[in-house]
Image (tube, helix red, strand yellow):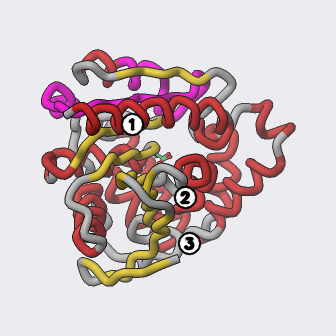
Amino acid sequence: MAQVNINNINLAFDDTGSGRPVILLHGYPFNRTLWGSQVSALRNNFRVITPDLRGFGESEAAEPATMALMAQDVAALMDALDIPKAIIGGLSMGGYVLLSFYKQFTNRVEALVLADTRPQADTEEGKQNRVKQREQILRDGMGLTADTMLPKLLTPETVSTRPDIVNHVRNMIMNTKPAGAAAALMGMATREDQTELLQQIGVPTLIVVGREDPITPVQDSQLMHERVQGSRLIILEDAAHVSNLEQTESFNGVLKSFLRNQNGREATD
Ligand code: MLT
C-alpha cells in the first residue's frame, strides 16, 4: 500500500504492474480490495491503480465527500503518479465518481468501464433513506448496513455457497469507518444527474452489470448503452450487484478483451 497527501487528505492506493495505466474505483461501502482479482488478472499487461476513495479503506475520511471531490482526488492522484491519461473503471459509487471525473477531466480519460452503476441522481425517497442510514451508521456503526446490504449485493446462491465472497464483502463493509460512510452517503445523495452527459461521451466504453442486480438494475445499464455511442453492454448471469466478485472469470474475460482492444487502438492510432 502507498499513500499520497492530496486535497488535504491522506489517500491510500495500490499501484501494481506496468504498461498502460488502468484505474479502478470501488463502490460503497467497500475499498480497494474489491479489485483484487482484477489486479491479478491485469498486472502482467497493465499498470493497475486502485485507490481507497476518501473515507474508505485506509484513506482518511473528510467532509464533504461529494462525487466531484472524489473525482478530484483521483485526478490529484494521477498528477502525483505522473499519469496524464488512463483507462478508468468504476463499480457502482465508483461509477458515479467516474462520470463526474469524465465531466471534469474529459481529456484525461482514454476509455471507461461502468460496472453495476447508473447515471441518474437519487430520487427524493432515496435521498431521505441516505439521511436515515447516515444517522443510523453514526449511532450504531456498520453492522446493520452489512446485514441489510449483503442480500442485495450478492445472489442467494452466492450467499449460501460462497463463504469466501460473503466474508470478503462483509469485511469490507465492517472495516469502513462510520465517518467515511456517512460522508459518502451525503455525497451520493447530493450527486448530479449525469444522464445528459452520456451522449457526450466520446471514448470507448464498456458497461457490465449482473443480471440480478437490484441496486443498479439492468435497465440502468441498458439506458447507458443506448446513450453512450458505440458502447458495449455485457450482462453477467448469476450475478447481483458486485458482479466482479461473483463472476470473476467472466468479468475478467470481458475486461481483458475490452482492454486488449484499447491496446490495439494505441498500436494502430
Ligand atoms: C454502491 O455499491 O456503491 C452503492 O450501493 C451505490 C448506491 O448506494 O447508490
Secondary structure type for disc 2 = loop
Estimate the x, y position of residue 191 in percent, counting from the top left: 26, 49
Looking at the image, is mark 2 or mark 3 nearer the viewer? 2
**Residue at image location 44% in from the left, 43% down from the top:** 92
| First in residue order: circle 2 vs circle 1 | 2
Above or below for 254 versus 25: above
Q: Judge the density around disc 2: few (<14), some (14-19), many (≥20) Cα neighbours within 10 Å.
A: many
Q: For disc 2, does the CB lie below 8 Å from ligand 1?
A: yes
Q: For disc 3, does the CB lie below 8 Å from ligand 1?
A: no
Q: Which circle marks residue 114 in the picture? A: 1
Q: Judge the density around disc 1: few (<14), some (14-19), many (≥20) Cα neighbours within 10 Å.
A: many
Out of 229 and 141, give the one closest to the viewer.
Answer: 229
Looking at the image, is mark 1 or mark 3 nearer the viewer? 1
**Residue at image location 27% in from the left, 58% down from the top:** 71
Q: Judge the density around disc 3: few (<14), some (14-19), many (≥20) Cα neighbours within 10 Å.
A: few
Residue position marked by numbered label 3 in the rendering: 139
Inter-mark Cα distance, 2 to 1:
16 Å
Inter-mark Cα distance, 2 to 3:
20 Å
**Residue at image location 57% in from the left, 28% down from the top:** 210
Inter-mark Cα distance, 1 to 3:
33 Å
Q: Amino acid at mark 2?
A: Phe
Is residue 220 part of the magenta span, yes or no? yes
Out of 94 and 66, give the one closest to the viewer.
Answer: 94
| First in residue order: circle 2 vs circle 3 | 2
Above or below for 134 versus 98: below
Looking at the image, is mark 2 or mark 1 nearer the viewer? 1
